[in-house]
Amino acid sequence: MAHSLRLSDLPDATRAEVREIHGHPMFRSRMLALGITPRSPIRVLRRMPMGGPIEIEVRGTRLALRLSDAGRITVTVRA
Amino acid sequence: MRIAVAGNPNVGKTTLFNALTGRRQEVANWPGTTVDYVTGRVPALAGEPLELIDLPGTYALEAYSQEERVTRNFLLHEPHDAVIVVVDASRLERNLYLALELIELTPRLVLALNMMDAAERDGLRIDAKAMSELLGVPVVPTVASRGTGLRELIAAARVAAHRRDLPVAAAAVPYPEEVRRDLIAPIAARLSALPGLRHPPGWTALQLLQGERDIAAALAVLPQGKSALALARDLLAGWGEPRRADGTAPALALAEQPDVAGHQEELGLVLADSRYDFIAKILKASVRRRLRWRRDPTERLDGLLLHPFLGYLFMGAIFALGFWLAFVASAPLSGHIDRLLVAMGGATARWLAGAGAPAFLRSLLLSGIFPGVGAVLSFVPYMAVFFAVYEVLQDSGYMARASLLVDRFMQLIGLHGKGFFALVSAYGCNVPALTATRVMENPRDRLLANLVIPFIPCNARLGVMAVMTAAFFPGAAGALAMIGLIALSLLVLTLVTALYRHTLLPSEPAPLVLELPRYHWPSWRTVALAVWHRVWLFLSRIWWFLIWATIAIWALTYFPLGQPIDHSYAALLGRWLTGLAGRHFGFDWRLMIAILFGFVAKETTLSTLGVLYGSGSGYVSLAHALTHALTPLVAFTYLVVYMLYVPCLSTVVQMRRESGAWSWAALGAGVNVAVAFGAGFLVERIGIWLGFAP
Ligand SMILES: Nc1nc2c(ncn2[C@@H]2O[C@H](COP(=O)(O)OP(=O)(O)O)[C@@H](O)[C@H]2O)c(=O)[nH]1
Ligand SMILES: [Mg+2]
């Protein structure tokens, strides 16, 4: 069973796959250039305190995104 | 022969560029932008001389920031013979994305597989030859920080510069057959018949399909260019629609609104997907990974430096050390420069007196020109150390971590996490802090930071504030007054930021899209060269303004000839200013003049006050003279105004540069003055209401 959720809600260290990217076209194409494309494996490494940004790993690089921006990305977790 | 160096941020472009060009470099400003770039010459033993251009880092050809736009414009429109794409060998998957985009654009390209040492430490074995065969361009392994592979790289670039075949274009990346057949091929066919097409047809077709506006606009002015545009639009509109039995796309009913934008986005996903699939294929064929049990040192360090509690302690310690070096440890150097200039001025004046030069000339030199030069040069030590610290934090990869740590809190005051370092460093000096705002991609975020940074009291202002609070509020009251002042500056900063956000710059801070690069030891050469460029750019811009300003001050206090200072033009001006504004605050003409002259350089405020209050030099006598002339309330009001109004001439000149327009600099300065006097007025009224003597 696979279920989908927002990247901002993905628990730490859980392996997931990107499903969809929403938001402004500029934001979407930047995510693509940074390697966040549908089907790419992704995981959350750590969260900053008090609802700060999250650090994620995708395609061998580490990126930081604000929670609100991470909320525009949906991921699926294979159970 | 001109060769551009391009690549993602933090992959070693500048290190490579420096290793190749040494000190034969020039900084310039990109016309119409606030982006600086560096060009350099490579000494040629044989063959044509080479010019290298260190382009700003970019993740994709599509520009997201002003820096990236400069890179895009250079690669698309400026003449160059070849491109060196630098990639981080230990982060290939993402790095190759840009490389593929550039390969589609030009065949005259060499891939520098940099940071091979880091890749090896990660247990990666990379077969450059296999990679080169799949990509269709030369691939040269390098270690820029050690100078390895650079000669081969340049040789390959020379060869590449003479390639004349068309890029393998859309063929390099195996896009899905239906995309190639139905979309790219027909448009490319129509484009290749176009006279005056500047870029490869296959690449141009892809740009049109993705709706790149500047490419479309450039095509629209070519004869028959419009037909290619229309074709791209029609094909996109029909793309993915159910096909007719004979395989042709359905004719669109005129009334139907074709969803071009939707199809464009969908196509964008398909293209990115094929690129990453292709990259996966390349990596599979060329990279062997040996399993390593050692934990990645970057990960171990981040466990500490990004720790939800310890991370902030480390950040505090790192920044404290950096700013201590920049603004405290470097202070004696500024002092030496100062004393040297005073001595030189004195010697010159004595020599002039001996030669029988008129008194006014001696005074001009001693009180006009030498202090002007001194004002310029006194910036140098802390600018140099500041930029060294900045560069080390940036190149080591720490700055990205600090931005990440503070972004949440910066958002509370409406600013971007990447602006934190600039903001904190403004307590040292506003001028380099303005330059440090460049790490932000979004021009609005950057402009906003530029407009509010001057509200942060810098070293020079803090110094004057410390002296005056100590004189007027002895003991614990002084500390309290100081803390009150700084808290007030933060409050004002927050309010003014909110004001700008709700009026002139209505927007949320741009998305934080931050790569956390692996930690690297910075190379001293890269740091030294960057410091040199920044200090040089600053001095070359500012010296003219500062010298004229100090000469003007000298003239105002020196003329009319033979009059004591309280009959000089300066006093006249001061009295006029007092009538205009000062009297509402209890400021006399001397305080107004000190405010005015402090605009040139805040460091001079104490000496100006000393001269005006006739106290001679020395802290004790000045404090004594001031406490006799002013009430504590007037002094505190004065400090509030002093802390908040336009920091100095250099800041305004720098703000013009960072914002790109005098109008922004003027607006910023105007708001500063208005807010400063407004806050001063409030403080004074509240003080009187609380029962302090005006
Ligand atoms: N280990 C290693 N570090 C490197 C190499 N090349 C550059 N660096 C370091 O990587 C960091 C970023 O380099 P820089 O040239 O500023 O990257 P740029 O942003 O692409 O210009 C610096 O700290 C360099 O010292 C390399 O080949 N190996
Ligand atoms: Mg660089």
Image (cartoon, coloured by chain):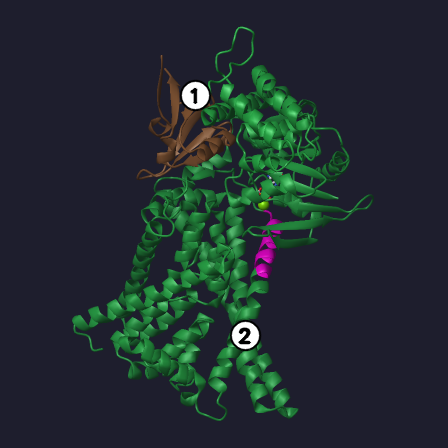
Label 1 is found on which chain of the structure?
Answer: B
Along the line of sight, which residue is nearer the eye, B526 or B121?
B526
Report the predominant secondary structure element of the magenta stretch: helix
Q: Which residue is mark 2?
A: B548
Mark number, residue B256: 1
Along the line of sight, which residue is nearer the eye, B189 or B76?
B189
Q: Position of residue B54 (x, y in %)?
A: 63, 45
Is the N terminus of chain B in the top left, top right, bottom left or bottom right quadrant?
top right
Along the line of sight, which residue is nearer the eye, B132 or B657?
B657
Marks 2/1: CA distance?
A: 67 Å
Q: Please tell me whether mark 1 sits on a helix, a strand or a loop.
A: loop
Q: What amino acid type is highlighted by mark number 2?
A: Trp
Label 2 is found on which chain of the structure?
Answer: B
In this rendering, the answer to whether B159 lies above or below B56 is above
Q: Residue at x 28, y 75 (%)?
A: B585
Query: For the view shown, which residue lies furthest in the right direction?
Result: B46
Find out whether residue B534 is within the magenta segment: yes
Task: Decide if ligand 1 comes within 8 Å of the CB at mark 1.
Answer: no
* Picture quadrant of residue B690: bottom left
In this rendering, the answer to whether B223 lies above or below B371 is above
Dot 2 or dot 1, earlier in sequence: 1
Where does the magenta region start and end?
B523-537
Which colour denotes chain A?
brown
Looking at the image, residue A42 sits to the left or right of residue B478; the answer is right
Q: Position of residue B117 (x, y in %)?
A: 62, 35
Which colour denotes chain B?
green
| Crowd tier of the residue under label 2, counting other residues whose Cα lies within 10 Å: few below 14, some 14–19, many 20 or above | some
Looking at the image, residue B159 sits to the left or right of residue B190; the answer is right
